[in-house]
Image (cartoon, grey):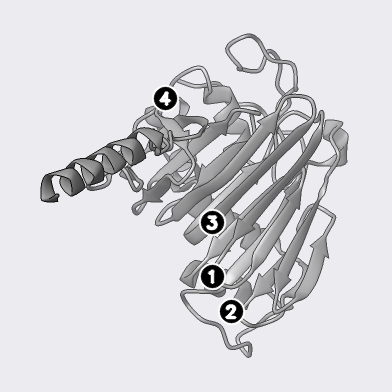
Amino acid sequence: MLYRFSLAAALLLAAAGLSAPASAQPVEVGTTASVAGEVTLDNDQLRRPIKLERRRRIAWGDVIATERNAQAQLLLLDRSTFGIGQRSKVRIDRFVYDPGKERSVIASLLKGALRFFSGAEEGARSGEVSTPAGRIGIRGTAVDMLVGERARDIAEREEAVGRRVRSNKDEATLVVLRGPVAEAGLTPGRVEVTGADVTVVLDEPGLAAFIPFRGAAPIGPFRIGNGGLARVQDQLAPRWSRSFGRGGIPDEVVAGAAAAVIGGILLGTRGNKDRDAAGSPTAQTCRDAQGQPIACRPPN
């Protein structure tokens, strides 16, 4: 009797094992286009974070973390781009891409600085980035997002916020609509910044919103000054920003076929949308943060 019960139990366990679905395979969302400084990747399948290198495939659930003076660029399958600044941590939660029909990305900015730059113009496109203080809905554009002490420090220098606003150093969230400018032939898009069930809309380049802590409504929209834009840029691309004072550009930032694309994104510009098979621009018009034409710097 005991033997029969054991045999039956074994058969049931074997059948359950055969019918159980295979472990979910990582859903690829893109690749690492550029890495500078100390950058790591972590996920549920890894025992410990690993060094992130260029051309590494990125999937749902991956967490990318950067140290001081480090930065990384992720090129998604639809040619949207994540620019991750120094001392940052970003998690890719979900990405859906149906060419010519639908594109949507959901991510979490846990700390630091992130720039989202939308890809090709065709099809429905949207993005959503959550932060400790709120949610950022992106409808086709380029947007900068900061979380933490630097977000608080930059916002407090702006007249619309000032030091009288109480902020949390770990949750403070600053959002800036960067463009593109109308002269580039692309729609500026819009950004919806939500906190405490209150939504502020940014629909012109240079407009910003600030959420001081979780449970607070956004302050804004307000126009961020040139000094604030420069400080945001320094968090997103510290090695790039400081390299101009030394008369060069870090090799690891511009290495590879994506170099010209990366340059345009880090400088708040965008080249011509015509690209060759490798994905690099065939022509480029570079502009500064205010949309004024500037000389394009070729990689060394």
Residue at 83 percent across and 47 percent down: it is 189
First reached walking from the N terminus: tag 2 or tag 4: 4
Q: Name the residue beneath numbered marker 2.
A: 214
Image x and y of residue 34, in percent:
45, 31
- CB of mark 1 within 8 Å of CB of mark 2? yes
Q: CA distance from mark 1 to mark 3?
A: 9 Å
Image x and y of residue 149, in percent:
47, 72
Q: Label 4 crowding class (10 Å Cα cut-off): few <14, some 14-19, many 20+? A: some
Helix, strand or loop under label 2: loop
Q: Label 1 crowding class (10 Å Cα cut-off): few <14, some 14-19, many 20+? A: some
First reached walking from the N terminus: tag 3 or tag 4: 4
Foreground label between 3 and 4? 3
On the picture, is 288 further left or further right than 46?
right
Q: Which mark is residue 55?
A: 4
Which one is in front, 135 or 83? 135
First reached walking from the N terminus: tag 1 or tag 2: 1
Helix, strand or loop under label 3: strand
Q: Which mark is residue 132?
A: 1
Residue at 79 percent across and 70 percent down: it is 199
Q: Amino acid at mark 4?
A: Arg
